[in-house]
């Protein structure tokens, strides 16, 4: 043991480095739980009783030397770091690298949420991977119903069906299952549909849906809510029109158009020379949907609406190709810094 102590003492005293990783290796070699010095203490019990006092003193001195060396090495490295910082030449030119910006989809999505929050809507979110009940059945899509063909789905599992959600309406079901009326909520998020990618369509896009449930909610309430949104988003001069449509989860249902904010309603290629641009679908919640969520449809009524954020952003910023939002081209994205 005496020979080991002498050898270790010599190695410790002669060790020097300015590299942090090597200092840590020194600590592990000599002072860690499985290091050389703790192993000597573990062998201390085999030392004859008459030698233990002297041997204990030597071992403690060895440990103290190793700890002192470790502290000196660490202080030296930290001192060098401080010196390097002080050596920075403050007269060098500033780095004028351009700052980043929010994505236009995030900007518009946040604006939609902010507009509806002013009239009492709160935000709820849910999973992007959904079961058949929340994505279809509870929303009045019976099995083999033709309405299911309206949405091409990315299935993950079959029997039972598990898929990427095709709309954020699935979150509406989750909220109605867990919350009793009255409720007024928004449901933003990504959705997925198996569609060919083109200038006007993508297999991934973003939605913001809304739901209001209470006693005596009417279609007039829905119309005034959406008129308020259109004017706040696109300008006070914006008009709306509602056209009859069909959705399995609302009855009656409608598509909402706004007066084209590019041509002012006079007609252009964006509005196909009609003066109107479709931006969302809406309607009164079907009683079957209420019953699926254990809400009494005889006492409660409500409306729902849903819009694609990309469509709103295309109109707001007059972008004619949806694919630009997904290409991460800095030349395109940097144009939206002023919209922060």
Image (cartoon, rainbow, N blue to C red):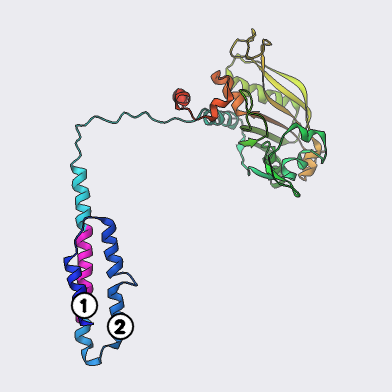
Q: Nearer the viewer, residue 305 or 154?
A: 154
N-term mark: 1 or 2: 1
The label shown at residue 32 is: none
The quarter holding residue 40 reads bottom left
For disc 1, the marked residue is 5
Extreme top residue here? Answer: 266
Q: Residue 292 at x, y = what percent?
A: 78, 44
Q: Nearer the viewer, residue 230 or 29?
A: 29
Q: Nearer the viewer, residue 103 or 11?
A: 11
User: What span is colored magenta in the figure?
Assistant: 57-74
Q: CA distance from mark 1 to mark 2?
A: 12 Å
Asked whether the viewer can see residue 153, the reply is yes
* Number of marks present in the image shown: 2
Asked whether the viewer can see residue 285, the reply is no
Residue shown at 65% from the left, 36% from the top: 192
Instruction: Give above or below for 263 relative to 18.
Output: above
Q: Residues within 10 Å of mark 1 (few under 14, many from 20)?
A: some
For disc 2, the marked residue is 43
Instruction: Give above or below for 158 relative to 108.
Output: below
Q: Nearer the viewer, residue 281 or 35?
A: 35
Majority SS type along the magenta span: helix
| Magenta run includes residue 250 | no
The quarter holding residue 218 reads top right
Q: Label 2's element? A: helix
Q: Quadrant of the N terminus?
A: bottom left
Q: Residue 17 at x, y = what percent?
A: 21, 58
């Amino acid at each position: 043991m005496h020979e080991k102590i002498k050898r270790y003492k010599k190695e410790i005293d002669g060790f020097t480095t300015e590299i942090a990783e090597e200092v840590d290796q020194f600590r592990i070699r000599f002072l860690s739980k499985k290091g050389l010095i703790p192993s000597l203490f573990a062998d201390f019990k085999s030392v004859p009783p008459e030698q233990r006092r002297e041997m204990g003193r030597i071992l403690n001195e060895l440990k103290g030397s190793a700890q002192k060396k470790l502290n000196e090495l660490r202080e030296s490295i930290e001192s060098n770091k401080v010196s390097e910082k002080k050596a920075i030449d403050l007269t060098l030119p500033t780095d004028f690298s351009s700052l980043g910006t929010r994505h236009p989809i995030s900007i518009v999505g946040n604006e939609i949420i902010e507009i509806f929050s002013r009239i009492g809507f709160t935000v709820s979110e849910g999973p992007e991977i959904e079961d058949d009940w929340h994505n279809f059945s509870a929303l009045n899509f019976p099995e083999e119903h033709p309405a299911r063909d309206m949405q091409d789905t990315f299935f993950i599992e079959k029997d039972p069906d598990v898929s990427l959600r095709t709309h954020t309406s699935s979150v509406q079901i989750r909220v109605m299952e867990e919350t009793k009326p009255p409720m007024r909520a928004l449901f933003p998020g990504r959705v997925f549909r198996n569609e060919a990618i083109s200038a006007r369509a993508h297999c991934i896009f973003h939605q913001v849906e809304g739901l209001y449930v209470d006693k005596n909610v009417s279609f007039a309430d829905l119309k005034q809510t959406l008129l308020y949104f259109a004017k706040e988003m696109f300008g006070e001069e914006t008009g709306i029109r509602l056209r009859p449509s069909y959705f399995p989860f609302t009855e009656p249902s409608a598509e909402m158009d706004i007066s084209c904010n590019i041509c002012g309603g006079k007609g252009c290629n964006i509005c196909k020379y009609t003066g109107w641009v479709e931006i969302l679908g809406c309607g009164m919640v079907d009683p079957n949907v209420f019953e699926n969520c254990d809400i009494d449809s005889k006492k409660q009524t409500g409306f729902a609406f849903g819009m694609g954020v990309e469509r709103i952003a295309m109109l707001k910023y007059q972008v004619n190709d949806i694919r630009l939002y997904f290409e991460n081209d800095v030349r395109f994205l940097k144009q939206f810094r002023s919209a922060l």
